[in-house]
Image (tube, grey):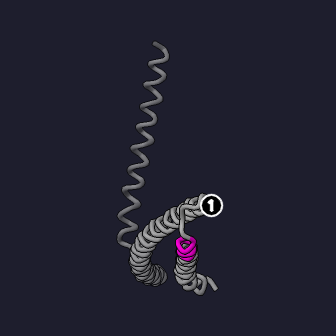
């Protein structure tokens, strides 16, 4: 019970201090609001406003530059993606052609071996063997030409990239 009386007394004193403080603030604010602004304050406000306008202009310019860079980047990425898709398609086609050529060469080698075995058994014409050998030689030349063409294609694609880096 004694504690409640003490708390009540402390609350009452705090409320009185708050009331006195509000009276002081209320009296001070109207006195300040009737005061004429300083010339220095007006100058400072104008300087701050100019600085704010300058920052807004700079911000707008930077925003525009970022937008332009982003558009350029998206355009370049799109072009590169198309180029990669085209090159991937070319590589897939070249890989298929190369595999066909290798398979044909292997078939030709197998046929020549069988023909050679037939000649040894006395069942084949030596002219057929020469023809098979010439065919095999031609197939090997075609394989080499395909390899050279593939390397030329790779080099043609790499040259612009190397020149950009250099």
**Quadrant housing the N terminus:** top left
Q: Residues within 10 Å of mark 1 (few under 14, many from 20)?
A: few
Closest to the observer, 150 or 47: 150
* Stretch in magenta: 126-134
What residue did someone put label 1 on?
120
Position of residue 135 measured from the top left corner of the image (x, y, whole percent): 52, 74
Closest to the observer, 62 or 69: 69
Q: Main secondary structure of the magenta part?
A: helix
Position of residue 123 measured from the top left corner of the image (x, y, whole percent): 54, 61
Report whether residue 72 is seen. Answer: yes
Closest to the observer, 75 or 126: 126
Q: Is residue 44 left or right of residue 78?
A: right
Position of residue 160 measured from the top left corner of the image (x, y, whole percent): 55, 85
Secondary structure beneath label 1: helix
Q: Is residue 128 magenta?
A: yes
Position of residue 126 measured from the top left corner of the image (x, y, whole percent): 57, 71
Report whether residue 56 is seen. Answer: no
Q: Residue at x 53, y 75 (%)?
A: 131
Q: Is residue 17 magenta?
A: no
């Amino acid at each position: 019970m004694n504690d409640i009386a003490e708390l009540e007394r402390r609350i009452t004193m705090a409320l009185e201090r708050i009331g006195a403080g509000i009276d002081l603030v209320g009296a001070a604010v109207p006195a300040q609001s009737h005061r004429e602004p300083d010339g220095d304050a007006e100058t400072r406000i104008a300087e701050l406003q100019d600085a704010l306008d300058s920052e807004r202009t700079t911000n707008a310019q930077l925003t525009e530059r970022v937008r332009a860079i982003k558009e350029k980047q998206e355009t370049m990425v799109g072009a590169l993606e198309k180029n990669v898709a085209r090159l991937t398609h070319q590589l897939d086609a070249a890989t298929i052609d190369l595999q066909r050529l290798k398979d044909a060469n292997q078939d030709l080698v197998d046929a020549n071996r069988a023909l050679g075995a037939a000649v040894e058994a006395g069942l084949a014409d030596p002219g057929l063997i020469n023809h098979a050998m010439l065919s095999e030689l031609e197939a090997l030349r075609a394989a080499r030409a395909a390899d050279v063409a593939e390397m030329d294609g790779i080099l043609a694609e790499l040259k612009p990239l190397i020149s950009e880096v250099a």
